[in-house]
Image: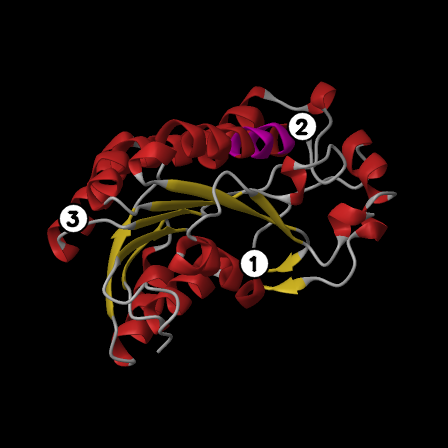
Amino acid sequence: MSTTTGLAGRAVVVTGAGSGIGRAAALRFAAEGAKVLLADLNGEAAEAAAREITEAGGTAVTVVGDLGDQAVVDRVVATAVERFGSLDVLVNNAGIMDRMSAAGDTGDAEWERVIRVNLTAPFLLTRAALPHLLATGRGAVVFTASEASLRGSAAGAAYTAAKHGVAGLTKSVAVMYREKGLRANAVAPGGTATNIQVDADREAHGPAVLGSYMRNIGSPAQAEEQAAAIVFLASDAASNINGVILPVDGGWAAV
């Protein structure tokens, strides 16, 4: 167990924790000695990850539901505080892709669902968690933004707008609460090997345009590489890092 992260015994909520980056982050926090609440829409996947943590001697609990629902958000926070006695770290990771649609081809349903899951849900959870995070005097929020939070050529209109919003929300929380001991940062993953689905019509205008830019992605990262950055930003090793959008993209942002 690490002696430098300061995460041992701390209470952590990770959303989208049933698979991909969220699962890898939950396992890594547990390996650092943290108590982890795994929130996911897929209960079976969340329970499987939680079992892996408990079988290794860690502490884990799950909450299943759609984080775009305020009642589910409230249940996540209440469960973490009830089971762990506090809430020290919130990882707003859960997200979905759009269809790579250009603005003119983005329907209301695609727009509203992507914005709700990728931007509104992290806002709702951050708002609900803030009183508990502030009570610790050392709280940390880590958002999963995206390369699409840095540029317009990495996804469709809805996903790009949502992830730019996540970057803005990260910076706002960082500034508003820094004097109260709370830090907020985000990772901006580039191409990463996960099971996130992209239901794109490759003949449509958006995917056709984006295809010419995607050659700059480079080699995809593993979910564990993203998780390492998330855990670092939440840890005492990053105690003076606040309001940062950290590309974890193999240099894509430098191209």
Q: Which residue is mark 1?
A: 195
Magenta span covers which residues? 160-166
Q: In this picture, is 132 found above or below 103?
A: below
Could you say which is closer to the camera, residue 65 or residue 169?
Answer: 169
Separation (CA) of disc 3 from disc 1: 30 Å
Mark in front: 2 vs 1 = 2
The secondary structure type at the circle numbered 3 is: helix
Q: Which residue is mark 3?
A: 81
Q: Residue at x 70, y 22 (%)?
A: 103
Q: Is residue 45 magenta?
A: no
Dot label at residue 183: none
Question: In screen coordinates, is 252 left or right of 124?
Answer: right
The amino acid sitting under disc 1 is Asn
Q: Residue at x 50, y 58 (%)?
A: 21
The secondary structure type at the circle numbered 2 is: helix
Separation (CA) of disc 2 from disc 3: 37 Å
CB of mark 3 within 8 Å of CB of mark 1? no
The secondary structure type at the circle numbered 1 is: loop
Mark 3 crowdedness (10 Å alpha carbons): few <14, some 14-19, many ≥20:
some
Mark in front: 2 vs 3 = 3
Question: In screen coordinates, is 51 left or right of 213?
Answer: left
Q: Which residue is mark 2?
A: 157
Residue 117 point in image, percent of width and height: 45, 35
The amino acid sitting under disc 3 is Val
Residue 93 point in image, percent of width and height: 45, 48
Q: In this picture, is 186 found above or below 6?
A: above
Work out whether mark 2 precedes mark 1 in sequence or the reverse, and give the earlier one: 2
Magenta stretch: helix, strand or loop mostly: helix
Could you say which is closer to the camera, residue 210 or residue 198?
Answer: 210
Could you say which is closer to the camera, residue 236 or residue 119?
Answer: 236
